[in-house]
Amino acid sequence: MAAEGPAGKREKLILDLHDIGGVKFGEYKLKTGVTSPIYVDVRCIVGYPELMVRLIDCMWEAFQERNSEAMKRLPLIAGVPYTALPITSGMSIKYGWRMVMVRKEKKAYGTGREVEGVYRQGEGCLIVEDVVTSGSSILETREKLERDGLRCEHALVLIDREQGGSSNLASRGIKLTSVLNMSEMLSTLKKYGRISEEVERETLDYLGRHPSNLNGRFLNGLKSKVADSPRLRFAMRADMTDCEFNKNLFQLMERKKSNLCVAMDVTSKSEFLRLTELLAPEICLLKLHVDTIDDFDFDFVHRLQDLSLEHQFFIFEDRKFADIAQVVRRQYAHGVHKICTWAHLVDSHLISGASSVKALAEAASGCPKQRAEDSRAIVLITQMSTADALTRSEVDLFGASMQAARDMPSSISGFVCQKKFYQDAHGLICYVPGVHLSSESDGGGQCYRTPESAVESGADVIIVGRGILESPDPVAAAKMYRSRCWDAYLRAI
Ligand code: S5P
C-alpha cells in the first residue's frame, strides 16, 4: 500500500503507471539508435479514465502548489500534441481553464491557423506535456503560441526524465514544473518490489550518461553528470526554488557578487565579532559553531544580527542535528542558544530519518524572527570532507537526501556535500566545505581542495575556515577566496 498524503498520491500514480505499462524496463532501441533500459510511454492512459482523473488532479495540484502567483496570470493552457492533449482537455474541463490547441502541421486550407481557440494577444499560456526529455517539443509548441501573440513562461509535465530538459527550458526562459521525476519513480518502484536495485542503478546510470540536447540527439560519452548539466545563473535559479531562504540567498549572491561562506571557527566573542566586521563585505554566508564560543551571551547574538543586516550576509549555525524529532526540536528552539531565533540556516544529518528534519522545519515555522521577511532553512549533510567519513560508504544517503528535499521543498535549502550528486533541481543549493588554497589536509582527517575544484564539482557556496582565519592577513585572504570562488562560478555558467 502506498503512503498517505501528497507523497502517497504520487507513489500510487507511479505504481499505477507501471501497472498499465506506461513505464517498462528491458532493452529498447530508440530512434537515435541508442539502447535504453527504460521505456516511458503514457499514451495508453486514455484507456484508464479513473487514473486519468487522478493524474489530472496531481498535475493541477503540483502546479498550483508551486506557482500560485503565476497561476493568476495564466488564463490559458495548451497541450503539446498528441499525448498531452487529452490530459490538457481534462484539466480544462475540470478546472475551468480555457484551452487552446496547437496544430502539429500548419493547415494549407481554411483559416490556415496554427493555434485554435479563443484568446487575446498577450495572454499567458501554460504548456502541458506528458514526458519531457530534452524539452524540444515544449519549445516548438511555445514558438507557435508566441507567433500568435501568447506569452509562455511555464510548462507543466507529468514525468521529467531528468536528462537535462528542465535546464534546457530554464535557459530559454521556461520554468518547468514536474509531478514525477525518474529518480523518484525508480526509487518507488524499487521500494514496492517492482524492480531490483540493479535495474534502478543501471537505469539511473543510463539517464546520467545520456543527457539530451535540444536537437533531441543524445550526447555520448562518460562525462560526469555535473559537467553535462548546464549551470544557470543564481539570478535565474532564484525563480526556480520553493525555499524562501534560497531565493534570498541566490539574490544576495548575485547582488553582492560573492558565493563565499566563511567558517568563523574562533572561540571568543570579541575575536568573532572583530573578524566578522572585517570579513563581512566579502561573504554571502557566515557559518559558526555557537557551542564553541566560550563567552556566549545574547549580546553576542544581537551584535551578530546587526552585522548581518548592515553587511548583508546570512547566518548558518553548523549544529549538525542528529537526534530524534523531540530532541532536535528542543536543541533548535530551546536551551542556552535558542538557535532558531537567530540562525537563518542550520544543518542536519539524516541519520535519524526525515522525521527529525521535519521536526526542525516545523519548529522553524513557529519561531520568533528578527524581521518578518527573515526565512529559515535546513541543509542536509550528505557527504563529509573527512578522509574516513562513513558517508563515503555505500549507504544511499544521496537517494534519501533527494527524497527529503522533494518532500519538504519549502524547507530544504540543499546539501552539504563534496560533489553535486543530482541533476537539474536548480532550486537547491550545493554547499561545499574542505577548501584551502595552500594545504591538502589539516593533518587531522580534513581533506582540502581549491575553490575551482569545488565549483567544478558543482559547489554553489564554498565554505572556507582556516584558509582565511589562519592567514596572516584574513581580509586579503577573504578577498582572494571570494574572487576565486566567484570567477570559478562565472566560468561554470
Ligand atoms: O563535511 C564537512 C562539513 C562541514 S559543515 N566538513 C567540514 O569541514 N565542515 C565544516 O566546515 C567544519 O565544521 C568547519 O567549520 C568548516 C571547515 O573549516 P576549515 O577550517 O577546515 O576550512
Image: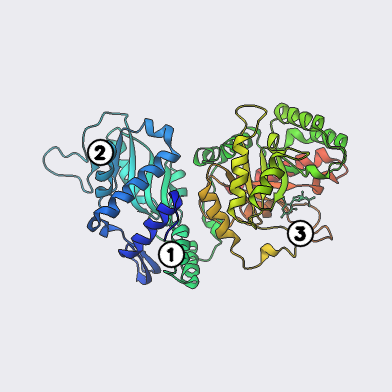
In the picture, residue 412 is in which quadrant? top right
Q: Looking at the picture, does residue 475 appear above or below residue 440?
A: above
Label 3 belongs to which residue? 447
Kindly indicate the quadrant of the structure image that contains residue 476.
Answer: top right
227 vs 66, nearest the viewer: 66
* Amino acid identity at mark 1: Leu
Give the left or right position of residue 116, taking residue 160 as reference.
Answer: left
First-in-chain label (2 vs 1)? 2
Count how many numbered circles sit on residues in the image: 3
Instruction: Tell which circle, 3 or 1, labels the residue nearer the N-terminal end.
Output: 1
Q: Amino acid at mark 2?
A: Met
Residue at 58 percent across and 53 percent down: it is: 354
Disc 1 designates what residue?
A: 189
Q: Amino acid at mark 3?
A: Cys
Whole-percent x, y for residue 49 in the image: 24, 53
Determine whether, in the image, residue 418 is placed left or right of residue 471: left
* Earlier residue among tags 3 and 2: 2
Q: Is label 3 in contact with label 2 (beta carbons under 8 Å)?
A: no
Separation (CA) of disc 2 from disc 1: 34 Å
Kindly identify which residue carries mark 2: 99
Q: Position of residue 77 (x, y in %)?
A: 30, 39
Q: Secondary structure at mark 2?
A: strand
Q: Is residue 264 visible?
A: no
Of the numbered discs in the image, which one, if any, rests on residue 106?
Answer: none
Disc 1: CA contacts within 10 A as few (<14), some (14-19) or many (>=20): some
Q: Residue 465: x percent and y percent? A: 78, 47
The residues tagged by marks 3 and 1 sit, at their Cα atoms, a distance apart of: 37 Å
Residue at mark 3 to residue at mark 2: CA–CA distance: 56 Å
The residue depicted at 24 percent of the width and 40 percent of the height is 93
Place of residue 244 in the rendered image (x, y in percent of width and height, measured from the top left): 56, 37
Q: Residue at x 55, y 50 (%)?
A: 405
